Image (cartoon, rainbow, N blue to C red):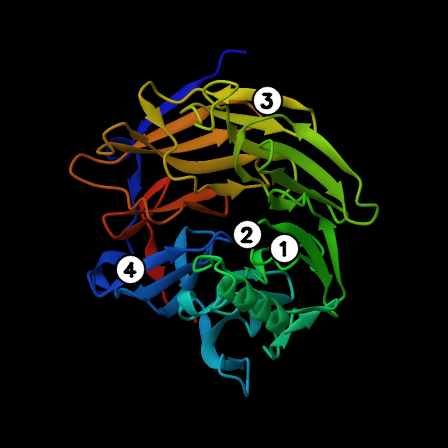
Amino acid sequence: MIKKFHYLIIFTVLLVLVVGSLSVSAIGKGDYKFKIFSDGIVAKQSNELQPSVEEGYTIDDTNQLKKMTKETVKITVNQGSDKEYSLDLVKFKENNKIIAVKPQEGYRAYNFKESKNHIAFTDRLLHGLWVADKETLTPINLQPETVNGISQKELFNKKKELEKQGKDLDNAYLFWVENVFWSPGGDKIAFNSNRHVYPRSDMAIWVTDLAGNTTKIVDNKEASTIILGWINETDLLYTDTSNHSLYKVNINSKEKEQVYGRAVFTDYSSTGRYVLYREFIDKDSIIASDDLYSLDLKNNASSKIDLPSGFDAFSGYYGWNDTKNKVAFYISNKNKDNYKLVIYNFTTSEIEIIDAPEGKHFDISVTPAWSKDKVLYILDGQLKSIDTFNLVVSDRT
């Protein structure tokens, strides 16, 4: 199949919207910056080293930013211990309905993930898995100090004993909970942990329900198994570092099946269908090639994504539109002084490549995201979309 390329030059094709609303650039450029969440929610943040969320927006049918009402709730985790600390969560609402909950300061809530009705996050030491209903935001630790007879205190004592014997364990870290994924129905959470082999670092895969009932699903014993995501309510997709292959596992039977052989798997769609990956440069190497491939798990088919010569997907951060089977990401040349925005269609294998206007620069630190089938991205500090040159603010609340 011959793949089609659509090269778009933003400043000659896209439309500027400035009529009837306040332009984003007039709000106070330099005093804030935008963050685009994977669900298409746009946040205006303070322009600081550790920014805080000030306002939140959705995008309406006229392609304008619509400000949501904001309610800030302070919660405290690890109460009564030397690990106690507080953080602020922000409820964003439209017509008194909760649209999203986000941490006001992202660095205080690690592994933050939303389901339809709940949030989940780990504390700063990765020593707890906190879950809260979006309405009440009362945090409950599903992975406390002791789970299934494994105690954090005992693990740390074990480390101290080994250090007394001369073992160098300065870099040994307990990942009690890491790499958190909600199940599609929002009633289970999969995560990685090395609690079973600490102070070794090898990760196993665990699943907990919302009552804290926790089961180890996959344990290679001599290597790490890293979750990519859920395929459906009963199957997980993961990679095994012992052979760099891709597997799926049923969380009930714990039966696993190899899905694809040796490669570097970079990202995965939340629908459980598409995987992005790179091949190794040869069968004995651990160095990945620059070429990017897509894998369709439903049809068991893979294909190379034909990026422009001399460019590769440098960042590994991808914005998925699962309803349209598309993904957006940045590519760069070898010198990292020329960046382009790419939209790839898994159904047709077509790609669109967007260049920044002359003298303008993409903010590659912000992953592109989708809202109402439009790609959102940041260009020189301003919020843009793929089919309109400048989104505008609409204060309708």
Farthest-out residue, front = 165
Numbered badge on residue 302: 3
Residue appearing at x 28%, y 28% in the figure = 333
What kind of element bears circle 1?
loop
Residue sitting nearer the eye, 35 or 199: 199
Q: Quadrant of the N terminus?
A: top right
Name the residue type under label 3: Ser
- Give the residue at mark 2: 201
Q: Position of residue 375 (x, y in %)?
A: 42, 43
Residue type (three-letter) at the residue carrying disc 2 = Ser
| Location of residue 214 by image quarter | bottom right
Going from the N terminus, do you reach mark 4 or mark 1 first? 4
Q: Residues within 10 Å of mark 3 (few under 14, many from 20)?
A: some
Residue that mark 4 sits on:
33
Mark 1: few/some/many CA within 10 Å (<14, 14-19, 20+) = some
The numbered mark, 4 or 2, whose residue comes first in the sequence reads 4
Q: Mark 3 or mark 4, which has the lower sequence index?
A: 4
- Pointer 1: what residue? 197
